[in-house]
Amino acid sequence: MTSIDFRTVRNPSIFEKGQIVPLKSHIAPVADVARAVRDALSHPLNFPPFASAMVDDDRIAVALDSTLPSLSEVVLGAVDYLLAHQASLENISVVLSPCCDTTLQTVRDNLPPHLHQKLAIFVHNPTDPSELGYLAASAEEALPIYVNRRLLDADVVLPISLYHRADSIDYFGIAGIFPLFADAEVMKRCSTLTNLGSPVQSRKRARDAEEAAWLLGTQCIVKILPAGNGQLQQVLAGDPQAVEAALVADAAKSLEIDLPQLADLVISEVDGDSNEQTWTNVARALYSARTAIRTNGAIVLRTQLQQTPGPSLRRLTSLDAADKIEKQLSKESGLDTLTASLLSDYLQRVRIFMQAKLPQDAVEDLGVGYVADDHQIEKLITSSQRCLWIPAAQHYVVKCEASESPPA
């Protein structure tokens, strides 16, 4: 096979017998993201224009998933809509889900002059009690529900989050509030294979998430459907159930890869800007790849990740057995905990390599092979009979009729 420019292969594809066979058609991205957000809020599904939910002097909290593609443009679109409908800038708070300082600074730096150094932007900290407020006790287990205090104190909350299919590893309902803006105890229940548990438990967590959003008074949400490569294919606003129904009916299939046979090698890429280069997205890409790979096959995680491994991932450097590591991880709620849990489990059955903007020893200490450049990936493809290439793998769900026993 000749040299591959991976930047030009933007659709999920099979590399086989010297050929590249696309598995999906090209997705046309949204050209003007800020405008698409404004238009969605002007024409929500099963809900009047969002401005009708606001009155003078309302305190408005915009709760944003910090891993959204085109994050700065989404912020701009939402805030400009609010300002155009009589909201005052001093009454608007943007609250980002947990992220690194670089993401926060990038959003601030990309603001236009009328918002720069004027718009209040915060990052949710699930471990700081002073930033949390008690919402209620959950209906099923009477567990306390804590959420970010700025959302709790707001008169109007507008959640804007990425769409995840119900069969993805971290689907927690449609609303986009829970667990992104909950406390560390809630995040703990959503951060490892052990705590994620069975499909029945997953559905229960989704119900808990919907309950928390309802208790918070969330009536209108914005959902972003990703296009890959840091872009969007659709922005929808409206009643949560109406938005989910529309996405499931019309768009969710675009995030599914139907694979005729399992692959020997999966190149699973986390693409997008720096705010998408996170350990959470690595976990999503890893889960998608594991669904598509034969036992004893190989996965290459192709990323631009610069975040150093956190405490959960550093547990993988110990000589403890995988079940003991998983038990320790089940008590943690870090941004890297889910990735650590998946790696601990999957490394027992497949080989895993990683390309990242990290020192080689930082990658290899995780029990993962280090890939220095795309030339090494090409060699792995050449030596494999059947390779699956998944750009934007953090967004996809893989389905294969010839699947082996599903991964844990």
Image (cartoon, grey):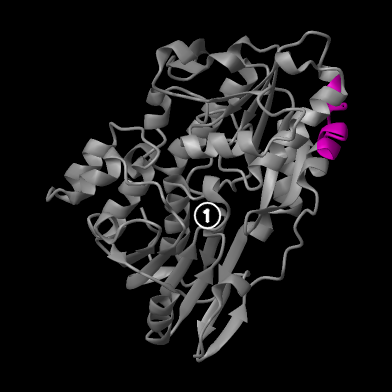
- Indicate the position of residue 45 as horizontal and vertical percent values: 82, 35
Q: Name the secondary structure under disc 1.
A: helix
| Amino acid type for the residue under numbered disc 1 | Gln
Q: Give the residue displayed 45% in from the left and 24% down from the top.
A: 125
User: Does 248 lie within the magenta span?
Assistant: no
Q: Which residue is mark 1?
A: 394
Q: Mark yes or no: residue 374 visible.
A: yes
**Vertical placement of residue 99 versus 317, above or below:** above
The quarter holding residue 310 reads top left
Q: Nearer the viewer, residue 331 or 194?
A: 331
- Indicate the position of residue 244 as horizontal and vertical percent values: 70, 40
Q: Give the residue displayed 41% in from the left and 51% down from the top.
A: 306
The quarter holding residue 380 reads bottom left
**Vertical placement of residue 371 versus 213, above or below:** below
Q: Is residue 46 left or right of residue 302?
A: right
Q: Nearer the viewer, residue 253 or 366?
A: 366
Q: Give the residue displayed 67% in from the left and 16% down from the top.
A: 217
**Vertical placement of residue 344 versus 289, above or below:** above
User: Does 48 lie within the magenta span?
Assistant: yes
Q: How many marks?
A: 1
The magenta span reads 38-51
